[in-house]
Amino acid sequence: MKTARPRKYLFLFLAAATVGLALYNNILARRALAGRPLGRFVHLRGTKLHFLEVGHGQPLLLLHGNGASAQDFTTSGIFDRAAARYRVLAFDRPGFGMSPRPAGRPWTAAAQADLIDAAATKLGIERYMVVGHSWRAAVALEMARRHPRSVAGVVVVAGYHYPSPRLALAVSALPAVPLLGTVLRHAVLPSLVRLNWRWAMRKIFHPATIAVPFAAMTRELASRPSQLRSISAESFLMLASALLPNRRYSDVAIPVGIIAGAGDQLFDAKAQALRLQSEISQALVDIVPDAGHMVHQSRPEAILAMIDKIAALAGVGNGAEPSGSV
């Protein structure tokens, strides 16, 4: 009995601490959205997508990577600078920013590709270009595969096109596990994300300097329990796709621009980019020196130049004349 009481008190203390941390983290999560620029919502397929829009001309859709939001492109300057030549729409993908991620369905690259295309159709957009960063490069390429009449051209930035099974992916997917994942997301991980934020930023930006606007804006968004669920779910999907052999992109028949940072520390981005180029007949590649995984933040002019080149190859918009490989 004497031994049981201390254990009981310890359990009650841990339970109270867990609940307290969960409440605190959920308060911070609500505050994280306060003051964010509010764009528009498009409702479809039982959910809604939040997006920011600016400019006129050829439609250009921007898709952020895992853990970020549409503001990834506003803080980089790409959103406003591209608006001088295009009608730019930056989406919060399902589960990120202000877009919810309905449970009960796997939000694969194909599912997100269909959703974004349906959103474009509902907004009256018949033909568009699309930019995808990191794993969302897979969504952009799936859009080209599944909706070739709608997609004029694609630009993929720091894409992990041929993922391989890695321990880091398995660890990142743990918060998607039922029950255990719920406790981790609500009580433990938000604080760990904040504590390790500087280290994470150094890793994804190296060898370039950290973009302070992006780091400051994303920190609280990425530590929200709901967004952590989406991050872990996408890590699980990436791990699952890594187990599928013989991934190929030779059926992509539209112009594709491929950009990678030469110093990317997450994977061998240059090798991934060159391999993808070898499979796609209408592909341009640019390996950007002194840039890492966040090459669009460090060198936005490289992405803008590639968008114009692909627009010219596709015969849409008012992009510059193509000049061959970048």
Image (tube, helix red, strand yellow):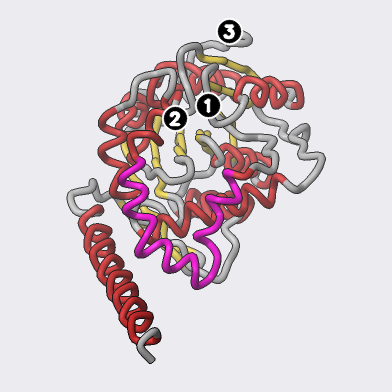
Q: Which residue is mark 3?
A: 323
Q: Nearer the viewer, residue 277 or 311?
A: 277
Q: In the rendered structure, which amino acid carries the disc numbered 3?
A: Ser
- Placement of 16 over or under 53, stated as above or below: below
Label 3 or label 1, whichever lies nearer to me, is 1
Chief secondary structure of the magenta span?
helix
Q: Which residue is mark 1?
A: 265
- Give the residue at x 49% y 72%: 179
Instruction: Residue lying at the far front in this picture: please name it.
Output: 2
Q: Nearer the viewer, residue 259 or 122?
A: 259
Task: Bin the neighbour count of mark 3 within 10 Å (Cα to Cα): few under 14, some 14-19, many 20 and up.
Answer: few
Q: CA distance from mark 3 to mark 2?
A: 33 Å
Q: Secondary structure at mark 1?
A: loop
Q: Secondary structure at mark 3?
A: loop
Q: Pointers 3 and 1 in contact (CB under 8 A)?
A: no
Tell me where residue 299 appears, x and y as whole percent. 41, 18
Q: Quadrant of residue 187?
A: bottom left
The stretch of residues the image draws in magenta is 168-196
Tell me where residue 92 appears, x and y as whole percent. 40, 49
